[in-house]
Image (spheres, grey):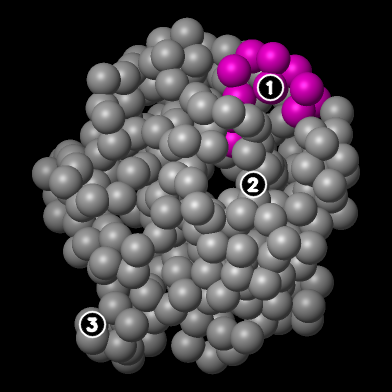
Amino acid sequence: MKPVRSLAAALADEVVLLDGGLSNQLEAQGCDLSDDLWSARLLADDPQEIEAAHTAYVRAGAQVLITSGYQATFEGFERRGIGREEAAGLLGRSVELARTAGEAARHEVWVAASVGPYGAMLADGSEYRGRYGLSVRELERFHRPRIEVLAAAEPDVLALETVPDTDEAEALLRAAAGCGVPVWLSYTVAGGRTRAGQRTADAFALAAGRDEVIAVGVNCCEPAEAAAAVELAAAVTGKPVVVYPNSGEQWDPVGRTWRGGSLYDPARACDWQAAGARLVGGCCRVGPDRIGELARLLGKE
């Protein structure tokens, strides 16, 4: 169902349920994601699989679908021989696929266009380190064209997600300013700091006072990191908080595989909500079953 309210308006009244990891659901459907483009490859080769994955989360109760654009960049597509015009069309398609899946729902579904970090384009795990050796201005130039194309596709929000350091956060916020679409900003953190080692309080403070930022928080971190980060983000910014940790398993970028067992417990969402979270879901390796559990806990059935 196409939403009749803005996402910002919904956050003023309720906790809104995000989806889970798109890549793990695609793999569960039998898709091969070994390519450097990851799930973005399917935008060109098998878009119906992406729509099917979104639909699985809608059926689980998700109210926000995060698009397949995380690793979709002009530079990445160019390496595959895809020109800028076709690449722009594929970025727009990422929004269309999520919108189509959401329109079949019985509840309101918002579409969040994923804007992944520069490191996602490198496909070497750099988003979990940050500090690419680029200036804020250089990072802004990288992000701006993709943000402009995604904004033109009219998502409900831009998800500036898995951001590893404050330089990239500043670049993303500059690139998104004036695009006409609200944003959320979410960092990936470890040990109470950004992946680049900065204080999370300073990182969250970048979003304070920016009207276009409707939520700030964390994603793709261990579940145990989430509660403290939510509390701090709320205190520093006074904004609704977005939180969608991964399963707690560890990604091995060399072996390109996940290691360890899942530590994601949907019951923790009650603590996140109490600390100020208003957008709650999961990231890598958190599937529709876990989102379904969250839906029941949050009264979204």
Q: Amino acid at mark 1?
A: Gln
Q: Point out which mark residue 84 bears.
A: 3
At x 34% / y 34%, what residue is drawn?
213
- Dot 3 or dot 1, earlier in sequence: 3
Q: Check disc 3 and give the amino acid type.
A: Arg
- Quadrant containing the N terminus is bottom right
Q: Residue furthest left?
A: 137
10 Å neighbourhood of mark 1: few (<14), some, or many (≥20)?
A: many
Q: Earlier in the sequence, mark 3 or mark 2?
A: 2
Residue 24, horizontal then vertical, whole percent: 73, 63
Q: Position of residue 67 (x, y in %)?
A: 52, 63
- Taking the image as shown, residue 120 lies to the left or right of residue 145, namely right
Above or below, comparing residue 234 to residue 5 in the picture: above
The CA span between labels 3 and 2 is 30 Å
Q: Which mark is residue 273?
A: 1
Total marks placed: 3
For the residues labelled 2 and 1, say whether their Cβ atoms are less than 8 Å apart.
Answer: no
Inspect the image, locate mark 2, and give the three-letter code of the amino acid beneath it. Leu
Task: Reply yes or no: does residue 278 show up in magenta.
Answer: yes
Residue 123 in the image: above or below residue 9: below
Circle nearer the viewer, 3 or 1: 1
Q: Residues within 10 Å of mark 3 (few under 14, many from 20)?
A: some
Q: Position of residue 274 (x, y in %)?
A: 69, 15
Q: Residue at x 20, y 56 (%)?
A: 144
2 lies left or right of 84: right
Q: Which residues are magenta?
A: 268-279
**Residue 147: image location, x then y, percent:** 27, 58
**Residue highlighted by disc 2:** 18
SS of the residue under disc 2 = loop
Q: Residues within 10 Å of mark 2 (few under 14, many from 20)?
A: many
